[in-house]
Image: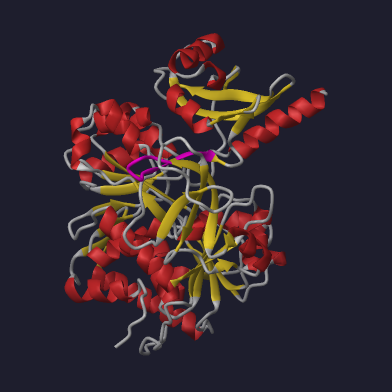
């Protein structure tokens, strides 16, 4: 009577009960669940015809299109392993990941083929499949995707017995000071994480989900599976474009989306945001970095968005915390509500156990003050890093995955991140949370985006520095920013210097890359000395 847990079973259910419902909208294209299933089955048969078998690895570098969704199902239902690639990384990183992952095939969008052209002679691949895209040509020797699936043999879909502990995807984390690491996620990992997505983001049959979050990032946080499970509608989005997103809110009546605070910031600050009338009150799950309370309040006021703060890492599939909203919170004023919504929150139903610990492994006090590290264990924690047992042992100690995030636990059990361990600023022996300073600065009307980092200081060792992108047309001086911080927080936490820039470095998913800023300022300091 035992049945393995796999999100692939949700496609079977969707086709059974919603065959004629629109499953996927991608620009002018629309596919019902029956049509979507037929295309994924064709992909599976075509892959099988050219030799892809159970446990083989297939790398995929595609934007948020129906082709990417098809790959998640078409590759995986063969028992093969999908390796989703970040198309914004360097060619050298692509070369490393494709070869390190032991991928036998690459499916790539023509827009990103140029990066592959540079490294094609170094890649160990049996075949390349190219998704044609208007306006982009490539010299790669590959097979057109549509031709590939249209020439699939007319045979029954190969029968594969899925073991829930076998790999479904290998998701590579961004390399900062070392090579990218391949996070091994199983069918069980993906199933239970997607179950959390379903339950805690309140996904229903009538939802219209906009894929603003890159599907390559932790498998769209599980959205690629969860939306199908409910028989809801996937709306594909090739790239994050605020006016397009705002238009889709109105035209398609979007009810749910996910993204980093940066994406949310782009939406609320776009001029069109104040002109549209959003009647659906879309739910938006926000993660990637702690969203400032002021940003959450703006999203509610301007776009009528219902913000749900979630937290996790690729290594945990990714969800391990969410900010559960209680009816009692409705009695608080808007600023207090926004402050609560900025917390990472409590364990999700299906993920397992998450807590904040001291260095000796004991849980910190639930006082909102004692700082510790977030650790997790349970159903969604990765099998390990692919071909890297040493890094796996460093990350998983005594059965607990160590996140490297520093946090406090409030009296109600809600966890709140104060910083990444590497981002905490230690000035004159005092710990300063960069995210706390950023939260204050986001309330300043002239600030569009901000990153706070540590910079070297002769007297204090290091001190906070604010790097700010101003709102269009806004003007403010460095001293005014410093004074504003000193008026709204402890003086020692206020930045000692401010730089104004046109943009901040970010990952493909919108996360700030503070390490690049630190490298810039610490390197310039060494050069001066």
Looking at the image, which residue sits at the far right?
Answer: 529
How many marks are shown on the rendered structure? 0
Residue 357: percent from left, percent from top: 51, 49
Q: Quadrant of residue 98?
A: bottom right
User: What is the quadrant of residue 396 in the picture?
Assistant: bottom right
Nearest the viewer among 477 and 147 is: 477
Q: Residue at x 39, y 18 (%)?
A: 445
Instruction: Report x, y in % for residue 390.
Output: 68, 64
414 drawn magenta = yes
Q: From this viewpoint, is residue 341 visible?
A: yes
> What's the residue at 69%, 48% (across, down)?
177
* Image vertical order of residue 522 relative to residue 48, above or below: above
Q: Is residue 415 above or below residue 170?
A: above
In x, y percent, where is residue 247? 27, 39
Vertical placement of residue 382 versus 43, above or below: above
Who's the residue at 42% across and 73% down the image? 187
Let me know if residue 313 is in the magenta part. no
Camera-side residue of 36 and 519:
519
Residue 220 can be seen in this image: no
Q: What residue is at 46 percent from the left and 56 percent from the top?
A: 133
Q: Is residue 102 left or right of residue 67?
A: right
Which stretch appears magenta?
A: 409-419
Figure quadrant of the C terminus: top right
Front residue of this view, candidates 373 and 92: 373
Near-viewer residue (362 or 304): 362
- x and y, in percent, of residue 216 in the image: 47, 57
């Amino acid at each position: 009577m035992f049945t393995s847990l796999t999100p692939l079973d949700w496609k079977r259910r969707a086709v059974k009960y919603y065959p004629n419902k629109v499953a996927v909208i991608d620009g002018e294209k629309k596919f019902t669940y029956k049509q979507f299933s037929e295309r994924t089955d064709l992909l599976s048969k075509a892959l099988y015809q050219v030799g892809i078998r159970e446990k083989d690895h297939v790398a995929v570098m595609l934007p948020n299109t129906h082709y990417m969704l098809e790959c998640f199902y078409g590759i995986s239902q063969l028992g093969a392993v999908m390796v989703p690639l970040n198309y914004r990384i360097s060619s050298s990183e692509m070369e490393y990941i494709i070869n390190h992952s032991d991928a036998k095939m690459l499916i790539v969008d023509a827009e990103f083929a140029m990066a592959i052209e540079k490294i094609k002679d170094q890649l160990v691949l049996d075949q390349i499949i190219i998704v044609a895209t208007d306006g982009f040509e490539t010299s790669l020797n590959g097979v057109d995707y549509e031709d590939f699936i249209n020439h699939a043999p007319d045979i029954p879909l190969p029968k594969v017995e899925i073991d829930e502990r076998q790999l479904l995807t290998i998701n590579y984390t961004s390399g900062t000071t070392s090579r990218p690491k391949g996070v091994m996620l199983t069918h069980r990992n993906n199933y239970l994480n997607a179950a959390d997505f379903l339950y805690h983001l309140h996904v229903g049959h009538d939802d219209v989900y906009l894929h603003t979050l890159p599907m390559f990032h932790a498998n769209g946080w599980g959205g690629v599976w969860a939306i199908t499970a409910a028989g809801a509608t996937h709306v594909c989005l090739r790239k994050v474009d605020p006016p397009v997103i705002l238009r889709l809110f109105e035209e398609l009546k979007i009810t749910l989306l996910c993204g980093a605070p940066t994406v949310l910031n782009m939406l609320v600050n776009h001029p069109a945001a104040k002109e549209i009338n959003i009647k659906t009150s879309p739910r938006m799950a926000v993660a990637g970095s702690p969203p400032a309370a002021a940003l959450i309040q703006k999203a509610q006021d301007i776009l009528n968005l219902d913000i749900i703060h979630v937290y996790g890492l690729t290594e945990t599939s990714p969800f391990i915390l969410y900010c559960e909203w209680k009816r009692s919170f409705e009695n608080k004023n808007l600023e207090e509500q926004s402050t609560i919504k900025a917390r990472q929150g409590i364990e999700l139903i299906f993920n397992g156990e998450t807590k904040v610990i001291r260095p000796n492994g004991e849980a910190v006090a639930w006082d909102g003050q004692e700082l510790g590290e977030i650790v997790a264990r349970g159903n969604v924690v990765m099998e390990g890093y692919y071909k890297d047992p040493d890094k796996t042992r460093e990350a998983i100690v005594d059965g607990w995955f160590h996140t490297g995030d520093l946090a406090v636990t409030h009296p109600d059990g809600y966890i709140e991140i104060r910083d990444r361990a590497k981002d905490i600023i230690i000035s004159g022996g005092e710990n300063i949370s960069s995210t706390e300073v950023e939260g204050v600065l986001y309330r300043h009307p002239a600030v569009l985006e901000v990153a706070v980092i540590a910079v070297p200081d002769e007297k204090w060792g290091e001190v906070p520095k604010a790097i700010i992108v101003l709102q269009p047309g806004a003007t403010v001086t460095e001293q005014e920013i410093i004074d504003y911080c000193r008026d709204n927080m402890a003086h020692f936490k206020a930045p000692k210097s401010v730089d104004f820039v046109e943009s901040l470095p970010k990952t493909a998913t919108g996360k700030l890359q503070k390490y690049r800023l630190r490298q810039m300022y610490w390197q310039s300091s060494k050069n001066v000395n």
